[in-house]
């Protein structure tokens, strides 16, 4: 794969995480405040698609380019690694939660879906938002090096 394309992937990943965040917030709003199941379903499907594109892009990028060393020093370094650590742990937790939540919705088992969905939403939002924060810190605020 062309290095130019590879170098664009982190920016695409930030876009996917931003889109996922917006769609999750909209989906939560449409079900909680408007009781609009159809719009909720579309928003959540969009968030799932955006997160899937993120994951494919992330795995592709890191298998080809490896990682970057965080460029920040001092207190910001501790903040970055705290955010990165919680993000990484919750990303691993989020995937099975998302799959179970979606499965329950697809099977129209809405009672079980409603029990886990608020927790899934919270974890998924945290992972999406902190993904953008990590991107901003690593690629713009305190550029990393190879």
Image (cartoon, rainbow, N blue to C red):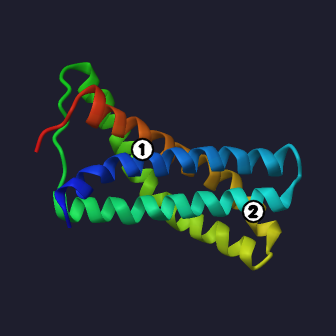
Taking the image as shown, residue 72 lies to the left or right of residue 108, namely: left
- Counting the numbered discs, the total is 2
Q: Nearer the viewer, residue 23 or 74?
A: 23
Q: Nearer the viewer, residue 71 or 2?
A: 2
Residue furthest to the bottom:
107
Residue drawn at (29%, 26%) of the image = 141
Residue furthest to the right:
35
In the displayed structure, 120 sits above or below 49; it is above
x, y percentage for residue 29? 77, 44
Taking the image as shown, residue 36 lies to the left or right of residue 117, namely: right
In the displayed structure, 78 sits above or below 119; it is above
x, y percentage for residue 130? 44, 40
Q: Quadrant of residue 63?
A: bottom left
In the displayed structure, 68 sits above or below 49; it is above
x, y percentage for residue 135? 35, 40
In the rendered image, the quadrant that contains the C terminus is top left
Q: Nearer the viewer, residue 128 or 111?
A: 128
Residue occupied by mark 2: 41
In the rendered image, the quadrant that contains the N terminus is bottom left
Residue drawn at (43%, 58%) of the image = 54
x, y percentage for residue 18? 51, 44
Taking the image as shown, residue 42 lies to the left or right of residue 131, namely: right
Q: Earlier in the sequence, mark 1 or mark 2?
A: 2
Taking the image as shown, residue 138 lies to the left or right of residue 127, namely: left
Residue occupied by mark 1: 131
Residue drawn at (77%, 56%) of the image = 40
Please say if the residues under marks 1 and 2 sit with CB atoms less than 8 Å apart: no
Residue drawn at (62%, 44%) of the image = 22
């Amino acid at each position: 794969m062309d290095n130019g394309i590879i170098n664009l992937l982190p920016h695409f990943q930030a876009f996917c995480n931003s889109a996922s965040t917006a769609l999750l917030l909209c989906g939560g709003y449409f079900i909680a405040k408007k009781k609009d199941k159809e719009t909720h379903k579309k928003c959540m499907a969009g968030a799932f698609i955006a997160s899937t594109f993120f994951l494919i892009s992330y795995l592709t990028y890191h298998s080809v380019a490896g990682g970057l060393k965080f460029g920040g020093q001092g207190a910001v370094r501790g903040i970055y690694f705290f955010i990165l650590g919680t993000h990484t742990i919750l990303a691993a937790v989020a995937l099975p939660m998302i799959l179970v939540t979606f499965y329950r919705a697809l099977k129209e088992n809405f009672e079980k879906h409603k029990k886990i969905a608020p927790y899934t939403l919270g974890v998924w939002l945290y992972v999406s938002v902190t993904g953008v924060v990590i991107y901003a810190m690593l690629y713009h605020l305190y550029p990393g090096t190879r």
